[in-house]
Amino acid sequence: MRAFLRLAILSMCLVAFGTSLAVAQTNPPPTSSSPPPERKNTFGPDEIIREGHRFFGTVSRGLAQVVEAAFSRWGEPNGYVLGQEGSGAFVVGLRYGDGKLYTRNAGDRRVFWEGPSVGFDTGGEGARTMMLVYNLPATDAIYQRFAGIDGSAYFIGGFGMTALTANHIVVVPIRSGVGLRLGANIGYLKFTQKATWNPF
């Protein structure tokens, strides 16, 4: 009788062990999940064109072509500025503007800009301005002087684009309107945290 009981208990233990082993095989322990992909910190051309159409209030092939020209030359920006500006010139010109810098994951900042220009141009303009910003290491890095890049002026379908640079950061203003005064002057833009009349 005792032998029979021992055999029965041993059989039940083997059955229980086999069942738990089968469950463990069909339900393997969870593996550590892979880390989520890093969030993109640049803006694609579709986002910039869509935002530009909303900002300028028009759907234009000219805007898309200017943006495509900027992306083909400098790639995807990691920031952009939306604002408005006014300028005037009689050989020597001045430009003043204000707007907001937008970044993907470094916050947004209010910015002002001003700067002189010298060239063969006369007249004035008021325009909405979108600026693409490349290689911006931190939002505060926008507050400096940016000088023009030679051969960077484009004018397509009512939109104009130039390029400015400082310390490996590239700022590409895209303007819409009359009196863009693109190729006939040279100068720089100074970005500041507060509005100032001093362009220097």
Image (cartoon, helix red, strand yellow):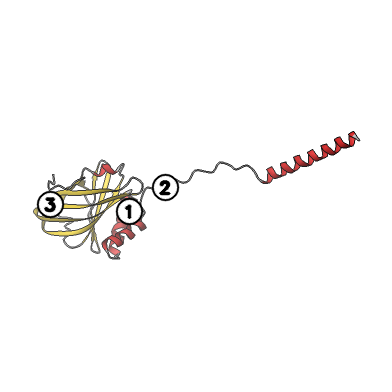
Which badge, 1 or 2, comes first in the chain's sequence? 2
Secondary structure found at label 2: loop
Q: Amino acid at mark 1?
A: Phe
Q: Residue at point 37% right, 47% down? A: 41
Which badge, 2 or 3, comes first in the chain's sequence? 2
Name the residue furthest right.
Answer: 1
Q: From the top left corner, tell me how far across and down residue 197 is, in percent.
A: 12, 48
| Structural distance between the alpha carbons of marks 2 and 3 | 39 Å
Name the residue furthest left.
Answer: 90
Which badge, 1 or 3, comes first in the chain's sequence? 1
Label annotation for residue 71: 1
Query: How many neighbours does mark 1 have within 10 angstroms: few (below 14), some (14-19), or many (20 or more)?
Result: some
Front tag of 2 and 3: 2
- In this orientation, which residue lies closer to the viewer: 114 or 75? 114
Q: Residue at point 72% right, 42% down? A: 20
Disc 3 target residue: 94
Q: Is residue 10 left or right of residue 111?
A: right
Disc 2 target residue: 39
Secondary structure found at label 1: helix
Q: From the top left corner, tell me how far across and down residue 58 is, in percent.
A: 28, 65
